[in-house]
Image: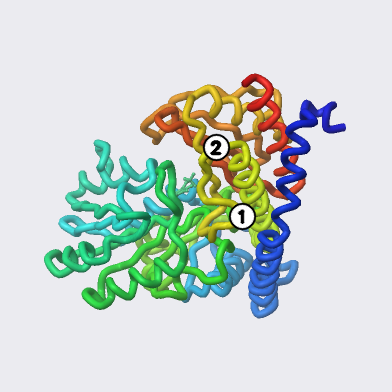
Amino acid sequence: MYNEFGISNKAKDLVLNAEENLKEEFKKIDELCDVNSLKVLNAFNKNNISEAHFGSTTGYGYDDIGRDAIERVFSSVLKAEDALVRSQFISGSHALCVALFAYLRPKDLMLSITGTPYDTLHEVIGIKENKSSLKSFGVRYDQIELIDNDFDYEKIKEYLRNNKVKLIEIQRSKGYSKRKSIVIEKVEKVIKEIRSVDKDVIIMIDNCYCEFVEDKTPLEVGADIIVGSLIKNLGGGIAPNGAYIAGKKELVDLAGERLTLPGEGREVGPTLGINKSILQGLFMAPSVVASALKTAVLTSKVLGDLGYDVEPLYNEKRADIVQNITFGNESDLVKYCIGIQGASPVDSFAKPSPWDMPGYDDKVVMASGSFTQGSSIELSCDGPIREPYIAYQQGSLTYSYGKIAVMKAITILTESN
Ligand SMILES: *Cc1c(COP(=O)(O)O)cnc(C)c1O
């Protein structure tokens, strides 16, 4: 059956042998899944979720009890005072954009302390010219680089002593960079340092890909506001689109005023029939994230065994669901992506090739045969066409499908070498 699916015996054996050595890692992931499942179920119970919440509104979307209940459930899962969970957010990037425009005013200063932010924010901030950027409204921006995969604590404190900063952005997941993603202990440490100098600065976390990977959220270690996408971890592969902004109530309300319009804010926003999917997605999310983590750990072990540089290592502590494989050349990167695409449930016949994706600086090769367009909690793999040709793989709704896809990708990678 494996051969019939285009998987070589060699690839199958490599993967099955690697899997034998992962029992300890998988046990930790199962325990994490239990803890997160408990959190979710508790939130559903406390908020008395019932079929009435699966209803829908149209038009303005006033009095949508399902939408309000969803926001309470997300708040309790994320340990937030409040949360805005809406399908009117196109994606995580849009939610980040809404948050930035909600909190920053002309002359305000925004500071990233994780180096250059995610590609799609370059035009939002004005790092890359755009007539509608924050910069075009007179919002100033500066950044401090990470050093050795950690915050430059002294430089950050020095900067805060000398400048009145309105908002600090911390991007936990690595995006298309070579750095490591940032575990919660480091977020906790840097927030303590920041607060020792500045009690008022808004600390905003780009939490994309990090939900349910560790047992604490950034809000539990002092962050003011966190932002993430529903076509990643918390959507559980079921939410059709959307994103969330969660944290301090006052900041969540401000984001609502900006997402819709001042004066109507969070009171409007029709749900058009998706409430049940959002709730069901959150319900599935602990288990789906666990499957994605197992797929990442397996990928790291097998590709590492094959001699490729992988980050994180299979037994390293993870902050997110992203697995890097450094291929060192365009051809292997593209081959690997072709293999992942070939093992997708949707568009398996498509052959990924590098293209100019809107919002990204380099050409990107992308394998994504997902039920939901662009969903990256479903197995997907992409990489910018630039040195050193790193693949960024994430997701898989189940571990079995992830494992099969890795076998297929390795078949294509190894047979033509
Ligand atoms: C995915 C991601 C985003 C948002 O991406 P969307 O595709 O717009 O949802 C933002 N920041 C990071 C670090 C991400 O990984």
Closest to the observer, 52 or 153: 153
Rate crowding at label 1 as few (under 14), some (14 to 19) or many (20 or more) other CA atoms within 10 Å.
Answer: many
Q: Which of the 4 image quadrants contains residue 191?
A: bottom left
Residue 411 is labelled as none
The residue lying at 38 percent from left, 54 percent from top is 98
359 on left or right of 197:
right
Closest to the observer, 403 or 373: 403
Closest to the observer, 70 or 361: 361
Query: Mark 1: which secondary structure?
Result: helix
> Residue 136, image x and y in percent?
21, 44
Q: Which mark is first along the chain, 2 or 1?
A: 1
> Residue 38, image x and y in percent?
68, 74
Q: Which residue is mark 1?
A: 235
CA distance for labels 1 and 2: 31 Å
Q: Amino acid at mark 1?
A: Gly
The answer to whether residue 276 of the structure is visible from this angle is: no
Considering the image in quadrants, where does the N terminus appear?
Answer: top right
Query: Mark 2: which secondary structure?
Result: loop
Considering the image in quadrants, where does the C terminus appear?
Answer: top right
Furthest residue toward bottom: 46
Residue 308 is labelled as 2
Q: Is residue 233 above or below residue 305?
A: below
Q: Amino acid at mark 2?
A: Tyr
> Residue 266, image x and y in percent?
46, 64
Number of marks drawn: 2
277 on left or right of 242:
right
> Residue 124, image x and y in percent?
32, 45
256 on left or right of 214:
left
